[in-house]
């Protein structure tokens, strides 16, 4: 889910590009923002700790 959210947020940031007058085309800014956002989402997804796995006894007892 992280890469998808990063892609959407990155593309949105590309649309709101403050450097648009500096020579980047709008399409380049949107695609660049989406790619960088996807990489950031992948990084967050990889660094996120996995939830603890409970065995069936703990689930039955409610621990």
Image (cartoon, rainbow, N blue to C red):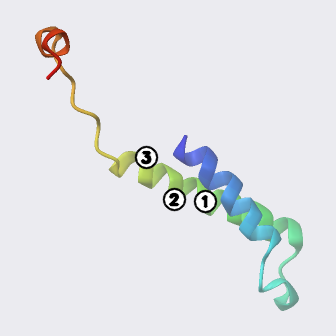
Classify mark 1: residues with Cα within 10 Å, few (<14), some (14-19) or many (20+): many
* 24 on left or right of 57: right
Which residue is the extreme one toward the bottom? 22
Q: Which residue corresponds to mark 2? A: 40
Viewer-proximal residue among 37 and 59: 59
Q: Residue at x 13, y 16 (%)?
A: 58
- Above/below status of 4 relative to 30: above
Quadrant of the image occupied by residue 56: top left
Q: Position of residue 39 (x, y in %)?
A: 54, 56
Contact check, label 1 and label 2, Cβ < 8 Å: yes
Quadrant of the image occupied by residue 29: bottom right
Viewer-proximal residue among 37 and 58: 58
* 53 on left or right of 40: left
Classify mark 2: residues with Cα within 10 Å, few (<14), some (14-19) or many (20+): some
Q: Which residue corresponds to mark 1? A: 37
The circle drawn on residue 45 is 3
Viewer-proximal residue among 5 and 40: 5
Q: Quadrant of the C terminus?
A: top left
Q: Position of residue 52 (x, y in %)?
A: 21, 31
Element type where label 2 sits in the image: helix
Q: Residue at x 18, y 20 (%)?
A: 54
Contact check, label 1 and label 3, Cβ < 8 Å: no
Task: Give the mark nearer the N terminus: 1 vs 3.
Answer: 1
Estimate the spatial distance between the alpha carbons at disc 1 and disc 2, rounded to whole Å.
5 Å
Task: Give the mark nearer the N terminus: 3 vs 2.
Answer: 2
- Above/below status of 24 relative to 7: below
Classify mark 3: residues with Cα within 10 Å, few (<14), some (14-19) or many (20+): some
């Amino acid at each position: 889910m992280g890469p998808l959210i990063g892609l959407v947020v990155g593309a949105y940031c590309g649309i709101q590009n403050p450097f648009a007058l500096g020579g980047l085309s709008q399409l380049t800014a949107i695609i660049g923002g989406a790619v960088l956002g996807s990489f950031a989402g992948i990084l967050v997804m990889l660094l996120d700790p996995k939830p603890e796995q409970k065995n069936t006894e703990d689930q039955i007892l409610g621990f």
